[in-house]
Amino acid sequence: MRVFTPADILLPRVDDMTKWSCIACDQFTAEPEYWREAERIVGSEPSTLRLMLPEAWLGVRDSAAETRKIYAAMKDYVNRGIFRTVEDSFVYVERTLPSGAVRRGLVGKLDLECYDWAPGSATPVRATEGTVESRLPARVEVRRGATLEMPHIMVFIDDPENAVIPSAAGGEELYDFELMLGGGHIRGSRVTGEAAERLTAALEAPEGAVRFAMGDGNHSLAAAKRCWEQIKRNLPESELETHPARYALAEIVNIHDEAVTFEPIHRVLLETVPRGFIEEAAARLPRGKGQAVTLLAGRREMEIETGMPLGALVALVDELLGDWRREHGGEPDYIHGDEEARALGGKPSSVGVLLPRLEKAELFPYITEHGPYPKKSFSIGHARDKRYYLECRAIVPEL
């Protein structure tokens, strides 16, 4: 089964690629100053910042008005001829992270008919974490009326020999530039013709096997899937295979790539009552050797070694915080980075829990046997390691 294939990829004709490429919309959600600085840097230049809605602005700015601006920017960029088309190709990507590590990936289109985020799914592309339904509507709304897509979706393959993606290197250079606001460096080259065909064959999915596992961007892929399910209801059978909305642009990465590291996604509860939180949480957490958590409440913190497997531990922490919120109020958030979570969870009216990281060798065996981890159980690397928006693709039959 062919799941991941070459695409007609749109790249911009712009003078400053650093201004064009912007970090994923779900980063720095509690740090609006990051996004204000990005807006200052971009100014009036063409940028993917104008083609997406940062989640930091949800509930702050008028989402409907922001979405209309996104549609207008897409139309404007197409009409002005900003894009050139790299036809029927993959893009081989080398991303130098802020740490100096180089992560290698391959951008192409993923067949949404081969993906399902529901627990118990038997599709070749599986969700690795539970989906936060409340985070879908804003993304669905943007995609529903969009003419273009741009991915921050990253999907894992399980390639212990690391033979597939590195074989794509050496093609025509497409871009090479520094990413804004400390995101590192990125280079991309074209993979087409026989080389692309070999990669497509190497990435075929055996019947019933988990060939691809979601890394980052599950909610964006879920939004694309939801939109496709709505669109296909009204399509003639002749268009079901070829309609561009059936696919989603994504980058695949080998989970065994040395630059791939897993980082926890911590929990904080803002505008709540911190007194008594550590004591209640400590009383409910088991003790044992293994996975540990750090409880935060105002300026206090406590580390507890629980011995629980990660999936069960995340579920218990979410239950605990949910109970605290029902009794004491508060606004939950998911935070990338220990320092950021400590800063937020350590505020006078906040509580938080720092969670442990997932060992990457556990991921494919776990989801094969148990299905997805609880929602927001892990993240790839740190916030600035995330995929930046860069490549685009048309998701309507004609632009």
Image (cartoon, grey):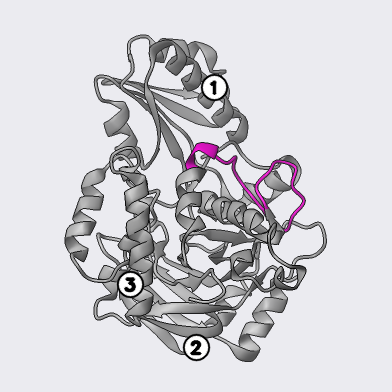
Q: Residue at x 39, y 57 (%)?
A: 385
**Of 38 and 254, which appears nearest the observer?**
38
To which residue does mark 1 refer? Answer: 319
Q: Quadrant location of residue 57?
A: top left
The residue under label 1 is which amino acid type? Glu
Range of the magenta residues?
116-135
CA–CA distance between discs 2 and 1? Answer: 49 Å
**Of 246 and 93, which appears nearest the observer?**
246
Disc 1 packing (10 Å; few <14; some 14–19; many ≥20): few
Q: Quadrant location of residue 309?
A: top right
User: Which of pointers 2 and 1 lies earlier in the amino acid sequence?
Assistant: 2
The residue under label 3 is which amino acid type? Asp
From what the image shows, is residue 93 above or below residue 192?
above
From what the image shows, is residue 82 above or below residue 355?
below
Single out the residue that lies furthest toward the right: 207
Residue 39 location (% of width, % of height):
21, 58
To which residue does mark 3 refer? Answer: 76
Mark whose residue sits in front, 2 or 3:
3
Residue 390 location (% of width, % of height):
39, 69
Left or right of residue 289, residue 300 in this image:
left
Is residue 119 inside the magenta stretch? yes
To which residue does mark 2 refer? Answer: 171
User: Which of pointers 1 and 3 lies earlier in the amino acid sequence?
Assistant: 3
Disc 2 packing (10 Å; few <14; some 14–19; many ≥20): some
For label 1, the SS is helix
